[in-house]
Image (cartoon, rainbow, N blue to C red):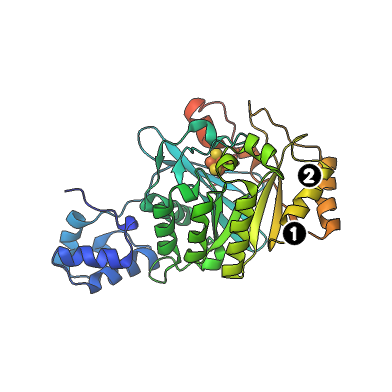
Amino acid sequence: MDVPNFYNLTLPELAEYLVSRGVKKFRAQQLFRWIYGERVKDFEAMTNISKALRAELPQMLKVELPTVLTEHLSTDGTRKYLFDMGEGKSVEAVLIPTAGRLTLCVSSEVGCNMACKFCYTAKQKLQRRLETWEIVGQFMAVSERLPEGMRISNIVYMGMGEPLDNCEAVFRSIEVLHSPWGMNVSRRKITVSTSGIVPMIPQVAKAGVRLAVSLNAVDDETRAKIMPINRRWPLADLLQACRDHCQQTGDKVTLEYVLLKDLTDSLKDARRLYEITRDVPCKINIIPFNEHPNSGFHRPSEGRINRFQEELMRLGAHVLRRKTMGRDIYAACGQLTTLQEKTPKSVELAPVPQ
Ligand code: SF4
């Protein structure tokens, strides 16, 4: 029988499993306290568990995190971790320090089927959806490697993959990371980002976490060109789902808008963006495109980026420009993984200080 991985289980599930193996229910709580509270993974070090049970536990349960293949530190402080997902596949997590926050961006799938044209991950197609332990494991493995005194404060599901294409594992991982018996991260500090799987958006409100939507264009024709998902769920449906989310939760939604030169970056686009979102309680994150080889898209000039932002501000939108972090370590969605798999020697990366 395959032994379950601790990180794949919620507290009630572990309790049920242990009981089925003749172990008292309260042991589940003890294990959670040791592993999440004390970060102790070795059963032998769990001193309030009887010696006999400590000897049996390895046959019942494994406590394994995904392996970190590489860790790279950018000159701007961004750290990027590449995780082994077996069979030569990998995913990445990116740790982004900003004023008073340490945000971990986690992956939910190996590759992605959403086929957004500007995205590097899309080139890999969906290989498989991650399991709960592999998502929780990104958080735990990065936490373990942080220097003393550093703690992840925020989590965004914005790495490789479409989180709402892997709802079960994503929302289970949120339960583990949020629960007091897990990592106790506030729901307010967890954000799920979607390319627009409209029927699944209500689940984000149900989980009580924040919603980000990758909008990226202001009309259906352009959006469908760069995000095929728009053919299935067009802008009107997506924006209505955003309004519903805001109404249910009282939250603002974050609308991500990648600025692509000569495609989505005109003043007319800025005005239209304001028009279509003015009745959606939101903040708009504009993200100048992070160029990558053979994408066919370009980053607008600084002048155009500024004019776009200023026009939105003039109209009264709540707009922020996302600083492009980690450009020297390929920290945009999926970029490092693809480079690692295909041309491992070609990427020059800043070393991690010891
Ligand atoms: S941008 Fe996100 S949803 Fe779109 S293809 Fe890339 S990983 Fe998938």
- The type of residue carrying mark 2 is Asp
Q: Nearer the viewer, residue 275 or 261?
A: 275
Residue 109: x and y in percent read 45, 43
Figure check: 177 above or below 290: below
How many marks are shown on the rendered structure? Answer: 2
Give the labeled residue for mark 2. 269
Q: Position of residue 158 (x, y in %)?
A: 55, 49
Name which of mark 1 and mark 2 comes first in the sequence: 2
Residue closer to the observer: 135 or 100: 135
Instruction: Look at the numbered disc 1 and give the secondary structure of its residue.
Output: loop
Quarter containing ligand 1? top right
Badge 2: few (under 14), some or many (20 or more) residues near its Cα, within 10 Å?
some
Q: On the rendered structure, is 242 left or right of 136? A: right
The correct choice, above or below, for 75 with respect to 9 in the image is above
Q: Residue at x 59, y 32 (%)?
A: 348
The amino acid beneath tag 1 is Arg
Look at 64% across and 32% down and name the residue there: 292
Instruction: Kindly state the secondary structure of the residue where label 2 is placed.
Output: helix
Towards the viewer: 313 or 11: 313
On the question of residue 82 being in view, the answer is: no
Q: Residue 278 shows which numbered tag? A: 1
Q: Where does the image place residue 306, in percent across and percent down from the top left?
A: 83, 47
Q: Label 1 neighbourhood size at 10 Å, few (<14), some (14-19), many (20+)?
A: some
The answer to which image quadrant residue 297 occupies is top right
Question: Does 166 sit left or right of 115 as displayed?
Answer: left
Residue 12 in sight in this render = yes
